[in-house]
Image: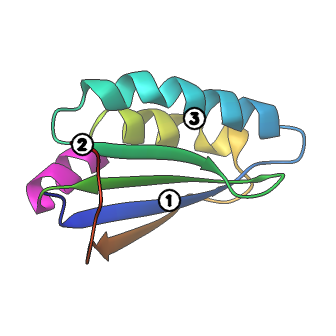
Amino acid sequence: MVKVALFVRLQAKPGREADVANFLEQGLALANQETTTPVWFALRLGPSTFGIFDAFADETGRSAHLSGPIAEALMANAADLLSEPPQIEHADVLGVKLPG
């Protein structure tokens, strides 16, 4: 069961919205490779605002994700795609409903 989460808000640079959306869509393949990331969502919150929500069983999984390939790719592309640094929020999961 997931206990901790991350919510990352991303603000695309003007004209780079499609690139950010494409980057996030491609992130799914990386998320599927992370065994400690059972929940991962890429979100469009508005015309140029995006987000990532992911949840983990414990702090070990969250820490592994923050140093994993998705975070690495995001930070490598942030200056090119985003108008400001990603806003990363740590959260505790108080309740969850997942299939299965």
Q: CA distance from mark 1 to mark 3?
A: 12 Å
Marks 1 and 3 in Cβ contact (< 8 Å):
no
Whether pointer 2 and pointer 3 mark residues with C-beta atoms closer than 8 Å, the reply is: no
The residue carrying pointer 3 sits among few (fewer than 14), some (14 to 19) or many (20 or more) residues within 10 Å by Cα, namely: many
The answer to whether residue 66 is left or right of residue 74 is: left
| Numbered disc total | 3
Tell me what residue is drawn at x 78 percent, y 57 percent. 46
Q: Position of residue 73 (x, y in %)?
A: 46, 32
The front one of 6 and 81 is 6
The relative height of residue 47 versus residue 35 in the rendered view (above or below) is below
- How far apart are labels 2 and 1 at the CA level? 17 Å
- Identify which residue, 75 or 44, lies in the foreground: 44
- Amino acid type shown at disc 3: Leu
Is 1 placed above or below 71 here? below
Gap in angstroms between the C-alphas marked 2 and 3: 17 Å
| Residue behind mark 1 | 8
Q: Earlier in the sequence, mark 2 or mark 1?
A: 1
Whole-percent x and y of residue 81?
70, 40
- Left or right relative to 69: residue 59: left
In which quadrant will I find the C terminus? top left
Q: Which mark is residue 79?
A: none
Drawn side of residue 33 relative to residue 77, left or right: left
Circle 3 is placed at which residue position?
Answer: 24
Q: Quadrant of residue 23?
A: top right
Judging depth in this view, the residue of 54 and 82 nearest the camera is: 54
Q: Which mark is residue 38?
A: 2
Along the line of sight, the residue nearer the viewer: 75 or 39: 39
Q: Which segment did they paint magenta?
A: 58-67
